[in-house]
Image (spheres, rainbow, N blue to C red):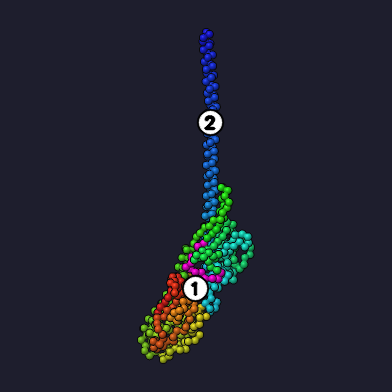
């Protein structure tokens, strides 16, 4: 009995010891568990914080890319909007001195200028309010402002002329690299745009670092305007080609008509009309009167040499150009400008331009020889007409067909 009782006590003691040991082990394991949970939680939080940081950084870069995209698209689109809006004014002849195109748009530029004159980073577009109707000006101003939505807001303060000022908080500078030269604008107000010099635009903007506590820095984004320049150069080429084709077709019709004229007693000799008389009809003030005066038996048409018929001074170069549009292109003066609102000039006789004169604008415009029964007295063909824009007036330099073409007869 005693033995059994002692055994029972011993077993109870052993059992209690094991329970305590298990409890002790269980408490130790729980602390390890807690430590592991803390470590995992810490790693997870670090990862989450990193994800949040990356998200903020990515969002910052996305905002920068969006800003630069808006600025580049805005400059390109506004360039086209301004050129198209002022095409009508640019093709208006205001006098006989060949003064049209950008030279007429004295307060207008197709490119924005960076300014901080009001203490804020601003893009300024120069627009001449006197050359557009109020509704057309307001429409153009609205287009320009909308082109920069998301990056700039329009300054509501009254601006000079019809100017548009856009405040761009992230913008820090804007320059144009044209032909290796940095300019605030590649085309000064009222100056010719050179279609061969495509501006490289450098936009400087403020970059913020919202997560790593780095100081803001000024970064530069670069793009060029090759697409819009290609668009307008194609437009220019179509204009110049149309003028050339119209003159060629008229010349060919004149030849066909004269060759078909078998009359020997009246009218002009066929060869005469191949070289000279059609020039009078294209560049003359009154093609009908020219026909009437020349269709006389036994006359040399010497009375054609009057200012009523032919404008022969350099100061009347604009009128000579306009006669081509009047007599051959249905009076459409839009052909007076290229795709960049530069004036198109027509020099009737390059054969009268001295060899040493390289500037086509300096070549004299002489009256063509009066039609004669003996075409040998007219001069020495072929005659060459130059159709060109100011950027390609140097005849010693090869020029693309969107800037200069020659027509030979």
Percent position of residue 132, x then y = 57, 70
Label 1 element class: helix
Q: Quadrant of residue 169?
A: bottom right
Q: Who's the residue at 61% across and 68% down the image?
A: 161
Q: CA distance from mark 1 to mark 2?
A: 86 Å
Judge by depth and name the residue closer to the eye, 182 or 362.
182
Label 2 element class: helix
Q: Is residue 325 visible?
A: no
Percent position of residue 194, x then y = 49, 69
- Residue marked by disc 2: 32
Q: Who's the residue at 59% across and 59% down the image?
A: 121
Q: Is residue 61 visible?
A: yes
Quadrant in which the C terminus is drawn: bottom left
Percent position of residue 277, x then y = 43, 84
Q: Main secondary structure of the magenta part?
A: loop
193 magenta-colored? yes
Whether 191 is drawn above or below 292: the answer is above
The stretch in magenta equals 189-201
For label 2, the crowd category at 10 Å Cα-Cα, with few meaning under 14, some 14 to 19 and many 20 or more, is few
First along the sequence among labels 1 and 2: 2
- Residue marked by disc 1: 390
Whether 59 is drawn above or below 1: the answer is below
Whether 180 is drawn above or below 327: the answer is above
Percent position of residue 325, x then y = 48, 77
Judge by depth and name the residue closer to the eye, 55 or 320.
55
Identify the disc placed on residue 80.
Answer: none
152 magenta-colored? no
């Amino acid at each position: 009995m005693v033995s059994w009782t002692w055994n029972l006590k011993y077993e109870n003691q052993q059992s209690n010891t094991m329970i305590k040991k298990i409890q002790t082990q269980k408490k130790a394991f729980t602390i390890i568990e807690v430590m592991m949970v803390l470590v995992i939680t810490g790693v997870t939080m670090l990862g989450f914080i990193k994800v949040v940081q990356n998200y903020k950084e990515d969002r910052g870069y996305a905002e920068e890319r969006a800003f630069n995209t808006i600025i580049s698209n805005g400059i390109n689109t506004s360039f086209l909007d301004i050129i198209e809006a002022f095409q009508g004014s640019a093709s208006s002849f205001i006098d006989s001195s060949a003064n049209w195109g950008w030279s007429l748009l004295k307060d207008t530029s197709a490119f924005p200028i960076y300014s901080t004159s009001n203490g804020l980073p601003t893009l300024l577009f120069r627009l001449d309010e006197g050359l557009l109707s109020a509704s057309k000006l307001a429409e153009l101003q609205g287009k320009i402002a909308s082109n920069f939505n998301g990056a700039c807001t329009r300054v509501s303060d009254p601006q000079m002329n019809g100017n548009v000022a856009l405040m761009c908080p992230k913008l820090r500078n804007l320059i144009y690299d044209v032909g290796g030269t940095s300019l605030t604008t590649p085309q000064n107000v009222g100056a010719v745009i050179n279609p061969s010099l495509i501006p490289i635009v450098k936009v400087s903007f403020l970059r913020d670092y919202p997560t790593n506590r780095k100081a803001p820095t000024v970064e530069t984004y670069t793009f060029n305007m090759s697409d819009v320049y290609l668009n307008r150069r194609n437009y220019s080429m179509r204009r110049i080609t149309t003028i050339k084709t119209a003159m060629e077709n008229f010349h060919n019709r004149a030849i066909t008509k004269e060759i078909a004229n078998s009359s020997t007693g009246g009218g002009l000799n066929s060869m005469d009309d191949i070289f000279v008389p059609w020039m009078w009809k294209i560049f003359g003030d009154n093609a009908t009167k020219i026909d009437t005066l020349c269709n006389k038996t036994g006359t040399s048409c010497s009375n054609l040499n009057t200012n009523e018929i032919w404008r022969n001074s350099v100061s009347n170069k604009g009128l000579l150009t306009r006669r081509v549009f009047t007599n051959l292109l249905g009076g459409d003066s839009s052909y007076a400008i290229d795709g960049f609102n530069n004036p198109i000039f027509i020099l009737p006789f390059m054969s009268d331009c001295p060899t040493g004169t390289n500037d086509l604008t300096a070549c004299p415009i002489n009256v063509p020889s009066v039609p004669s029964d003996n075409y040998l007295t007219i001069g020495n063909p072929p005659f060459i007409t130059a159709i060109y824009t100011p950027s390609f007036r140097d005849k010693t330099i090869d020029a693309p067909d969107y800037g200069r073409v020659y027509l030979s007869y």
